[in-house]
């Protein structure tokens, strides 16, 4: 590069001409080359990596897996428990009702009799005179009778008829029962009417048998 005033050759980087002392003009943009602009760094959005501590957005509330099914199952179990309790109450009440009147006691006893249910028969009949050995023998006889009958009910189509209270004893009554009774020797049923004596003991009506 030469001095603009005297034309003398200037050394590189000189600020004044060594011959005439003229200040060296600033380097033009063309000589210096294009201005280098600072690079702008692009923002890189990094996707969250599983297991990292980086949180980009608040996590949505997550329902426990199977939560709805668990609630439904608990509700179903609760309903079953309520049904069992209600059924137990109904059973107890039905037994109380069965012992609350002469006709109900007769029907309960005959229901057990039809099924050869020795315990059910004794529960609805007088049996204070039976010893423990007698009760065991009665249960055995009921089982044997059921086998001989080939599981046919001992009585069917039971119709409870007239109930007559004793005129002198309020704790005693008679109940007319019409039904078809099984003849174990022929395995055939015969329709007839029987009269059962029913007595009240300890607030409970029982068919008088033993």
Image (tube, rainbow, N blue to C red):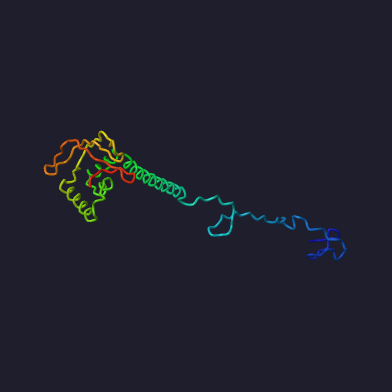
185 lies left or right of 134 = left
The location of residue 140, given as percent across then percent down, is 20, 53
Residue at image point 65% right, 56% down: 41
Q: Looking at the image, which is closer to me, 10 or 123?
A: 123
Q: Considering only vertical position in the picture, is 133 above or below 194?
A: below
Query: In this view, which residue lies farthest toward the top?
Result: 162
Rendering quarter of residue 106 = top left
Q: Residue 123, image x and y in percent?
A: 28, 47
Q: Is residue 48 above or below residue 200?
A: below
The quadrant of the rendering that contains the N terminus is bottom right
Q: In the shown orientation, is residue 28 left or right of residue 20?
A: left
Taking the spot 58% from the left edge, 59% from the top edge, the residue there is: 53
Q: Residue furthest front?
A: 168
Identity of the residue furthest to the right in this view: 20
The x and y percentages for residue 59 are 56, 52
Pick the front one: 21 or 55: 55
Q: Residue furthest left?
A: 186
Q: Is residue 108 above or below residue 59?
A: above
Give the number of callouts: 0
| Relative side of 177 to 1, left or right | left
Residue placed at 49% from the left, 52% from the top? 64
Nearer to me, 68 or 153: 153
């Amino acid at each position: 590069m030469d001095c603009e005033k005297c034309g003398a050759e200037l050394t590189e980087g000189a600020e004044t001409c060594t011959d005439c002392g003229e200040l060296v003009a600033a380097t033009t943009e063309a000589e210096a080359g294009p201005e280098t602009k600072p690079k702008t760094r692009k923002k890189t959005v990094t996707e969250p990596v599983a297991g990292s501590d980086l949180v980009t957005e608040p996590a949505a509330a997550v329902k426990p897996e199977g939560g709805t099914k668990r609630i439904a199952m608990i509700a179903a179990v609760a309903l079953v428990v309520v049904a069992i309790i209600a059924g137990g109450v109904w059973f107890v009440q039905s037994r109380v009702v069965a012992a609350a009147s002469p006709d109900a006691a007769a029907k309960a006893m005959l229901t057990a009799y039809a099924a050869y249910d020795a315990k059910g028969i004794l529960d609805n009949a007088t049996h204070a005179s039976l010893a423990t050995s007698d009760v065991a023998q009665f249960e055995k006889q009921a089982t044997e009778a059921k086998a001989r009958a080939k599981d046919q009910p001992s009585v069917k189509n039971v119709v409870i008829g007239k109930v007559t209270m004793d005129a002198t004893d309020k704790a005693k009554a008679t109940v007319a029962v019409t039904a078809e009774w099984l003849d174990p020797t022929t395995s055939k049923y015969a329709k007839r009417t029987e009269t059962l004596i029913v007595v009240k003991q300890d607030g409970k009506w029982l068919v008088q048998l033993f």
